[in-house]
Amino acid sequence: MPAVSRHPVHRRTTLAATAATAATALAAATGIASAAPGRAGAARRPRTAQEALEILMEGNRRWAAVHSRHPHEDRVRRRALSHEQHPFATVLSCVDSRVPPELLFDQGLGDLLCVRTAGEVLDEAVLGSLQFGVEELETPLILVLGHERCGAVRAAIEQLRTGKPVTGHLARLVESIGPAAWACRDLPGDWIDHTVAAHARRMRDTLRADSAFRPATVLAARFDLDTGRVRILR
């Protein structure tokens, strides 16, 4: 006959404590917050722009090293986000299919508010979307993300070179990117790459000058298609 433990209560208490510790460790490893329902991710959401930037750059380092974790994609996360969202950063990036912010920063559902336009060009709809992120969702960081070999930038430079009219709605892109391209025309090196950085800075400065975005920190960055790395622009 198997021996009966003389300390069943103590054993149950120990097992319960071990289970609780394991559950806590699992939640930390998977990024599942212990906040009350309806506050998805509130416990881990960074409260400052610096904290948000550090998480983005850490994720980008994983992406560049091909060590992405693909966090916050499970059923628990989907359910937690079904009624509310609390993204920790807003990213304004290009529509280029090679530059999806959630992937290159290794973030998941509910982490980022992404606004994408060709060449990060601003218009009223884009400005309203960015303001929604700052005012309604209280994201502390807006990151304007340009990228290497941007086709919209190339089109703007081609128009400056040839003077050939741009048709339809594409003219809006050239009009927006043109000032940065013109300012970089005499710089040594790659005209397109200089313009990518200059235009991202220009969009950053435009947002910084707008009172609607003063509650947030606005930064500019450049994504390198070759290395997979993001660099903050000064």
Image (cartoon, rainbow, N blue to C red):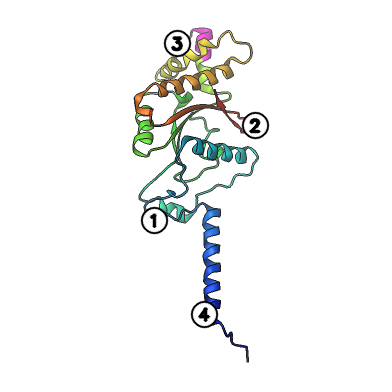
Q: Marks 1/3: CA distance?
A: 56 Å
The image shows residue 220 at horizontal and vertical percentages of 50, 26
Q: Of the two numbered discs 3 and 2 on the same chain, state the one appearing first in sequence.
A: 3
Vertically, is 130 above or below 4?
above
Residue for point 54% across, 63% down: 21
Mark 2 or 4: the one toward you: 4
Checking the image for residue 36, the label placed there is 1
Residue for point 58% across, 25% down: 148
**Amino acid carrying mark 3 in the image:** Pro
Q: Of the two numbered discs 4 and 3 on the same chain, state the one appearing first in sequence.
A: 4
Q: Which residue is mark 4?
A: 9
Mark 1 or 4: the one toward you: 4
Q: Classify mark 1: helix, strand or loop.
A: loop
Quadrant that contains the N terminus: bottom right
Q: Residues within 10 Å of mark 4 (few under 14, many from 20)?
A: few
Mark 1 or 3: the one toward you: 1
Residue for point 47% across, 12% down: 179
Residue for point 61% across, 38% down: 61
Residues at circles 4 and 3 in contact by the CB criterion of under 8 Å: no
Q: Residues within 10 Å of mark 2 (few under 14, many from 20)?
A: few
Residue range in magenta is: 157-167
**Amino acid carrying mark 1 in the image:** Ala
The image shows residue 186 at horizontal and vertical percentages of 58, 7
Q: Residues within 10 Å of mark 3 (few under 14, many from 20)?
A: few
Q: Residues within 10 Å of mark 1 (few under 14, many from 20)?
A: few
Checking the image for residue 199, the label placed there is none
The image shows residue 162 at horizontal and vertical percentages of 52, 8
Vertically, is 117 above or below 104?
above
Say if the magenta span includes residue 98: no
Q: Which residue is mark 2?
A: 227
